[in-house]
Amino acid sequence: MTVKYKLLYFDLAGRGEVSRLLLHQSGVEFEDYRVKGKDEWPSLKKDMPFGQLPVLQVFTDEGTKMLAQSNAIARFIARSHGMDGKDTWESAQCDMLVDVMGDIQDLYIKWKFGGDEGKEEKKAKLLESVPLFLTRMTKFIEANPSKSGYLVGSELTWTDVCLAYTLDILKGVEPNIAADHPKIQEHQEKIWSQPRIKAYRTKQERPT
């Protein structure tokens, strides 16, 4: 069965970037459709499952399907292309770690997009939470029985891409935020050096 993908998101990194990275890493052809904000979004919004982006359109011989919600899209891509672990246990570990990353991302979103009221307090809470988060991620890398340098198993999973991207947005708050966590920096370099991911990122100017 022939399968084609079209990922719809705004022309920024945000909640669509991990799925873009995974699609590039998978090596499949897809359309990276960048919605033109005020000009285009109002007419598209009514056709989206929950009136939000990102949305992944999946074209098959049986018709067109649409999948919404950023983690659901990323998980679907990962499971479809061998990036969610080798068994159900590894897959569950991937889900667990991505959920934890979501907690730190929520703090980032509240700081960046939550308005001016209490902005400094929000930033302080975010920065206070990061060291423990990075320490815990380091422990998973070190405890991985395969000693692969990845979070789960012996091969790259969507969890690794999520962590590399999460670190990117955190560095946008404080460039040296991972200075005391060399394993995390090494991990990000490992992910960003994947040939297909590197080729994509080299072409992008990626506002977060």
Image: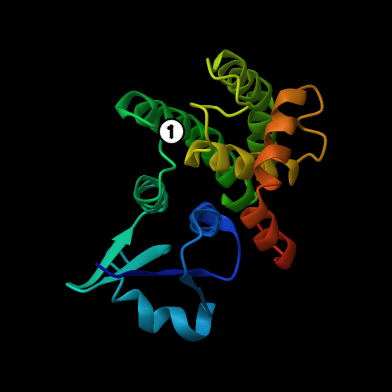
Q: Is residue 47 left or right of residue 115?
A: left
Residue 179 seen anywhere in this rendered image of the structure:
yes
Where does the image place residue 157, in percent across and percent down from the top left?
Answer: 49, 38
Q: Amino acid at mark 1?
A: Asp
How many numbered marks are there? 1
Who's the residue at 56% across and 13% down the image?
A: 143
Q: Nearer the viewer, residue 24 or 115?
A: 24
Q: Nearer the viewer, residue 170 or 159?
A: 159
Where does the image place residue 90, in percent across and percent down from the top left?
Answer: 39, 27
State the SS at label 1: helix
Badge 1 density bin: few <14, some 14–19, many ≥20, Cα 10 Å: some
Q: Nearer the viewer, residue 21 or 194?
A: 194
Residue 200 position (above or below residue 64) = above
Residue 207 seen anywhere in this rendered image of the structure:
no
Q: Is residue 113 left or right of residue 206?
A: left
Residue 50 position (above or below residue 59) = above
Residue 125 position (above or below residue 68) = above
Looking at the image, which residue sits at the far front? 1
The answer to which quarter of the image holds residue 208 is: bottom right
Q: Nearer the viewer, residue 59 or 175?
A: 59
Where does the image place residue 153, in percent across and percent down from the top left?
Answer: 48, 26
Looking at the image, which residue sits at the far left? 62
The quarter of the rendered structure image containing the N terminus is: bottom left
Who's the residue at 65% across and 50% down the image?
A: 116
The answer to which quarter of the image holds residue 64 is: bottom left
Who's the residue at 69% across and 61% down the image?
A: 199
Who's the residue at 64% across and 29% down the image?
A: 125
Give the residue at mark 1: 99
Q: Is residue 199 left or right of residue 159?
A: right
Q: Please say which color scheme the image uses.
A: rainbow
Where does the image place residue 60, in percent across and percent down from the top left?
Answer: 25, 71
